Image: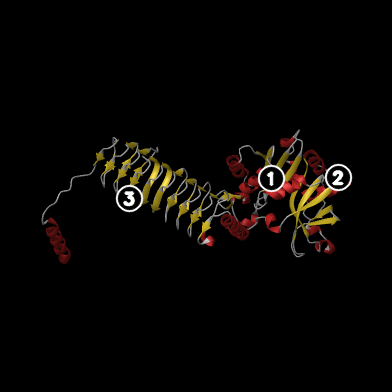
Amino acid sequence: MGHHVIILAAGQGSRMASDTAKVLHELAGFPLIAHALRAAEALEPARIIVVTGHEADAVEAAVAELAPEAICVRQEEQLGTGHAVLQAAPALAGAEGQAFVLYGDTPFLRPGTLLAMAEAPADFTVLGFEASPEARYGRLVTEGDVLERIVEWKDADEATRAVTLMNSGVLRGDVQVMLELLAEVGNDNAAGEYYLTDLPALARARGLTTRVTRCAEDETLGINTRAELASAEAAFQARARAEALETGVTLTAPETVHFAMDTVIGRDALVEPHVVFGPGVTVESGARIRAFSHLEGAHVSRGAVVGPYARLRPGAELAEHVHVGNFVEVKNAQIAEGAKVNHLSYIGDAEIGAKTNVGAGTITCNYDGVFKHRTSIGAGAFIGSNTMLVAPVRVGDGAFTATGSVITEDVEPGALAIARARQVAKPGLATKMMARLRALKTRN
């Protein structure tokens, strides 16, 4: 027993005017299919089956990365939603419990809504919402609290189109009964397709109970065009900003901050204007993200300060009270408590010890054209401005590097490393050179 989720993701999405499958277009830093998979997780499903079709290889690759436990099945011909669900039958052989049908292009379903569907006292329940009669959705025709049938807009007469209870397409019912009923669905309709929406009427004919679970219209928003994708992004960001403020995050200019689907920010953190959070970011309580910073795949601990104009890339781990300042990029690096990298530096594939100071213009030279190499800097070290650390290299605890050095060998703890050419002065030579050059310019 348990829950099983079928996500329909086979459609072409021609109105997106794109060579990319519709469900792979990004919302809040993740493809649309990721939002459907996240909604499914609320049900703690025994199985997730994704029905693919258009650009199936790319969609299946994305699903494998996002939810390795999910099973992908293909709908080779797009013959309607009922036909799509039937493609999941082999993957559900022997399954018991309830099956939910979700959609790969519907990103805003709330976990509580799906849980309400799971608990609804009916054999089958369909998710519905109220909208104006002008809306071109399928209609849920009810008698009292019983769902009689679903009528697609293009098949509806004038009286049915006056109904304001709309079909979201999301439904729940016994997994094996659902598959049996769908095998009976015909395609005698305006589109010549096998509709999933025929299922409630077939269930009623068997004496099964059918009901409607209601939700807000915004939860059912499907993405069909670039304009709708942009509107969905705006809606997501508005919701994410409101939730951040409600949970104790300070946003000094909320409308300028952009979140990803999985951004986590702790209470009493402060985020200044024009900050972008890509996927995989956690910011702990009391940290400060200063203006115009971009974070992705990064962890920022309590009391740390990032930016302004900083970039944290995947694998950036900042411990408590770390300072990463303006025009600093950090990638796949761990910076220990109290360390500072304040100006114009690149720290990649590195470890920096506690309370170490990294001077302006320092670069970890981590790439040899084929392989990446690591730089290790101990605690309490001082890295002089414009130091080039040619990895693999280690700088010990309490060591210093002189400004402008190119460090190619390990520096032992407590040592001062100087790796630069000796300065040589030629008295009067600058004056002579400039006089010669000006004379040449005059002749030409």
- Please name the residue that numbered disc 1 is placed on: 7
Q: Amino acid at mark 2?
A: Leu
Nearer-N-terminus badge (1/3): 1
For residue 79, say whether it is visible. Answer: no
Q: Is residue 115 left or right of residue 16?
A: right
Q: Earlier in the sequence, mark 3 or mark 2?
A: 2
Dot 3 alpha-carbon crowd within 10 angstroms: few under 14, some 14 to 19, many 20 or more:
many
Q: Secondary structure at mark 1?
A: strand
Q: Residue at x 78, y 61 (%)?
A: 164
Mark 2 burial class by Cα count in 10 Å: few <14, some 14-19, many 20+: few
Q: Is residue 361 above or below residue 133?
A: above
Q: CA distance from mark 2 to mark 1?
A: 24 Å
**Circle 3: element type:** loop
Structural distance between the alpha carbons of marks 1 and 3: 50 Å
- Does the image show residue 44? yes
- Res. 390 image quadrant: top left
The type of residue carrying mark 3 is Gly
Would you identify the image quadrant in which residue 15 lies?
bottom right
Q: Position of residue 129 (x, y in %)?
A: 75, 57
Residue depth check, mark 1 versus mark 3: number of the one nearer the observer: 3
Mark 2, residue position = 208
Camera-side residue of 27 and 143: 143
* Drawn side of residue 384 relative to residue 289, left or right: left
